[in-house]
Image (cartoon, rainbow, N blue to C red):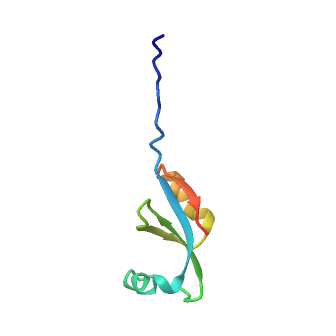
């Protein structure tokens, strides 16, 4: 019996959203002219290798941005 299998691989990249303290990005924010409260909690998107790609002020915005750019966001605790 000869059977052909058609495998469709999902090529949607997975990104990881985790909370970070604003203090982690204060210097970069200041260099970009952005003022942050050092006690604020932010939400960072990271690629599969752990590289920070973007930072948002709320979780919903981070997830929406990831999806808008063709990625599947996953929450990291």
Single out the residue that lies furthest toward the top: 1
**Residue 30 occupies quadrant:** bottom left
Reply above or below: 38 against 58: below
Q: Quadrant of the C terminus?
A: bottom right
The residue that appears at 48% across and 83% down in the rendered structure is: 24
The answer, for residue 35, to whether it is visible in the render is no
Horizontally, is 31 left or right of 41 in the view?
Answer: left
The residue that appears at 55% across and 65% down in the rendered structure is: 17
The answer, for residue 6, to whether it is visible in the render is yes
Single out the residue that lies furthest toward the left: 31
Residue 68 or residue 21, whichever sits in front: 21
**Residue 41 occupies quadrant:** bottom right
Reply above or below: 6 against 51: above
The residue that appears at 52% across and 58% down in the rendered structure is: 65
| Residue 70 image point, x, y percent | 48, 49
| Residue 72 image point, x, y percent | 53, 52
The residue that appears at 47% across and 46% down in the rendered structure is: 12
Reply above or below: 43 against 11: below
Q: How many marks?
A: 0
Reply above or below: 37 against 18: below
| Residue 43 image point, x, y percent | 56, 71
């Amino acid at each position: 019996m000869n059977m052909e299998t058609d495998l469709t691989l999902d090529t949607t990249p997975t990104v990881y959203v985790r909370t970070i303290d604003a203090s982690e990005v204060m210097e970069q924010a200041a260099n970009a002219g952005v003022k942050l409260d050092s006690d604020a909690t932010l939400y960072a998107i990271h690629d599969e290798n752990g590289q920070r790609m973007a930072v948002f002020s709320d979780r919903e915005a981070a997830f929406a941005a990831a999806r808008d750019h063709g990625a599947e966001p996953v929450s990291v605790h």
